[in-house]
Amino acid sequence: MMSDSDSGTVLIDKNSEKEPTDDSPKTSEKTKTNFDVIIIGAGPAGYTAGIYSSRARHDTLIISGLLPGGQLMNTTDVENYPGFSDGIMGPDLMQVMRKQTERMGTTIIDDVVVNVDFRRSPFKVLTASEEFEAKAIIVCTGATPRKIGIDGEQTFAGKGVSYCATCDGAFFREQPIAVVGGGDSCMEEAIFLTKFASKVHIIHRRDEFRASKIMQERALSNEKIQVHWNSTVKDIKGDEKVKQIILTDTKTNEETSLDMGGVFVAIGHEPNTELFKNQLELDENGYIILKNNTETSVEGIFSAGDVHDHRYRQAVTAAGYGCMAAIDVDKYLAEKK
Ligand code: NAP
């Protein structure tokens, strides 16, 4: 490891087991590890933050995480992102956002952050192989669909169990499909799936929905949708693919088996905040609490997107938050000078 004396930048030769010497070539194979700003996560929030941060002339790094592009990589048509009059596929949208971010000068590394140290500045962000430092951080790690937590769910993930109707609905033409949940997402998914399914079964654990009245009305008035109230999915069975689900009636404990081609789980999302549990203030559901515009409970650590926003959860709002966080970081760094 060596320090570039002009910038204080530490360079690492990724291809060498040995520590590079002063006369090692400074090529693109080397990764800088000191930045003004590190953005953790590469969904719409992370990329937008990168664009604004780099345009404000801050040396900016994005560490993308396991799924560069975030949740939109698992969607098909995106019709509500402004600027695309004919709609755009989710992965294509993320690809152009990434290109735009790189063009602005942001460094992007496809790696996973395994630890952070936000106790003092410069803040530390660690991957399995490297340690990065920055004067400010923007956390854009998003949220992940919640799991039911039964064995069959894991066994048949991608083989009939799905978390995204728009991505996978078309695979279940003329088959019975179960949708688990009771909120707006569940209603939306169930209604969407009636386009393909022979019948849609909503499985809800209580006797009333949490969803908005209008969404409930739409679902309940759809002839293809049947609701199983007070029911939980005990198991999912099949061979290569899902064939049946076993329901338990929560009032009587009675078990019923239903033939099913697919199971869509729509029971909400979990914010990706495991890394920040002991470092940032989180609410009772694990979402990051913002204290001062987009700044978190720690001065110098900002956040944008679904990791703090459980209300709107849209690509366009996440992008908006990314912009806001980068502007807040710019002000923070200017005041620090
Ligand atoms: P949500 O509102 O939190 O609803 C989650 C549903 O899943 C609840 O009905 C809950 O049951 C059920 N559930 C949770 N954990 C479960 C488990 N382990 N097993 C079985 N069922 C379980 O989540 P969401 O539907 O994803 O919506 C999140 C937010 O996005 C909401 O604010 C919603 O309004 C918004 N949204 C809006 C739209 C729209 O306006 N078009 C579309 C989608 C989402 P209980 O009710 O018994 O707790």
Image: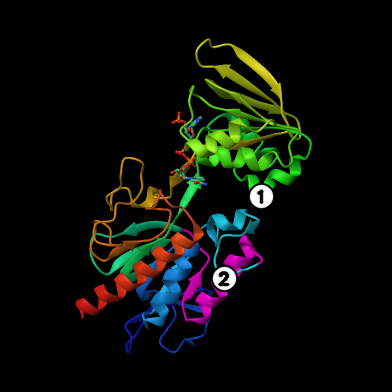
Q: Look at the numbered disc 1 and give the secondary structure of its residue.
A: helix
Query: Quadrant location of residue 328?
Result: bottom left
Which residue does the numbered mark 2 point to in the structure image?
83
Residue 257: percent from left, percent from top: 68, 18
Relative to 136, say whether 263 is above or below: above
Q: Are marks 2 and 1 in contact (CB under 8 Å)?
A: no
Asked whether 183 or 132 is in front, the reply is 183
Three-letter code, disc 1: Cys
The CA span between labels 2 and 1 is 22 Å
Q: Which residues are magenta?
A: 86-112
Does residue 17 appear in this view? no
Relative to 308, say whether 227 is above or below: above
User: Residue drawn at (57%, 75%), measured in percent from left and top?
Assistant: 99
Asked whether 85 or 214 is in front, the reply is 214
List the single residue furthest toward the right: 174
Within-10-Å neighbours for mark 1: few <14, some 14–19, many 20+: some
